[in-house]
Image (tube, rainbow, N blue to C red):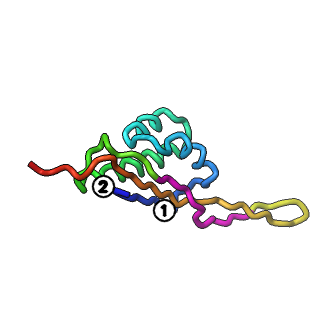
């Protein structure tokens, strides 16, 4: 693992994030960002942002952008906001507005670049 980036409390359910994750898991980091550019899903915006953060962190550590690939990408369940809606016979129904925690780990095929 070269670098890890986390995004917590994202206001989208993990079930909506996971299909977008399947598109980019295991790809080169730059290819993944380019691919997410054209995906018309709300989760693609969040994924693209966190992958760019991980790439920037790896760049600061001295790794080459082109050698980075996504080794681990996980969307876990976060807390849920509970809201209530009126139902028939005077009842109340719970509406859960779910959140996600997103974890991205990048790995490299290359060793750290030597400063010349």
* Left or right of residue 33, residue 66 in this image: left
Q: Position of residue 67 (x, y in %)?
A: 32, 43
Q: Position of residue 43 (x, y in %)?
A: 54, 46
Q: Is residue 7 above or below residue 108?
A: below
* Sooner in the amino-acid sequence: mark 2 or mark 1: 1
Q: Is residue 74 magenta?
A: yes
Q: Position of residue 17 (x, y in %)?
A: 57, 49
Residue in the foreground of this view, choosing between 6 and 72: 72
Q: Which residue is at 57% across, 60% downward?
A: 76
Quarter-of-image position of residue 60:
bottom left
Q: Position of residue 54 (x, y in %)?
A: 36, 53
Residue identifier under label 2: 57
Residue identifier under label 1: 8
Q: Residue 90: which disc?
A: none
Q: Which residue is at 59% across, 49% downward?
A: 18
Q: Which residues fall within the magenta stretch?
A: 72-84
Q: Give the foreground label among 2 and 1.
A: 2
Q: CA distance from mark 2 to mark 1?
A: 17 Å
Residue in the foreground of this view, choosing between 91 and 49: 49
Q: Which residue is at 47% across, 53% downward?
A: 72
Q: Residue furthest right?
A: 89
């Amino acid at each position: 693992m070269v670098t890890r980036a986390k995004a917590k409390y994202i206001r989208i359910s993990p079930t909506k994030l996971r299909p977008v994750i399947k598109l980019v898991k295991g790809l080169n980091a730059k290819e993944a960002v380019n691919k997410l550019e054209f995906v018309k899903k709300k989760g693609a915006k969040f994924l693209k942002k966190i992958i760019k953060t991980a790439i920037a962190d790896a760049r600061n550590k001295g790794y080459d952008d082109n050698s980075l690939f996504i080794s681990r990408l996980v969307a876990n369940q976060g807390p849920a906001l509970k809201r209530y809606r009126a139902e028939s016979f005077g009842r109340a129904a719970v509406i859960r507005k779910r959140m996600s925690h997103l974890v991205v780990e990048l790995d490299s095929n290359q060793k750290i670049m030597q400063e010349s």
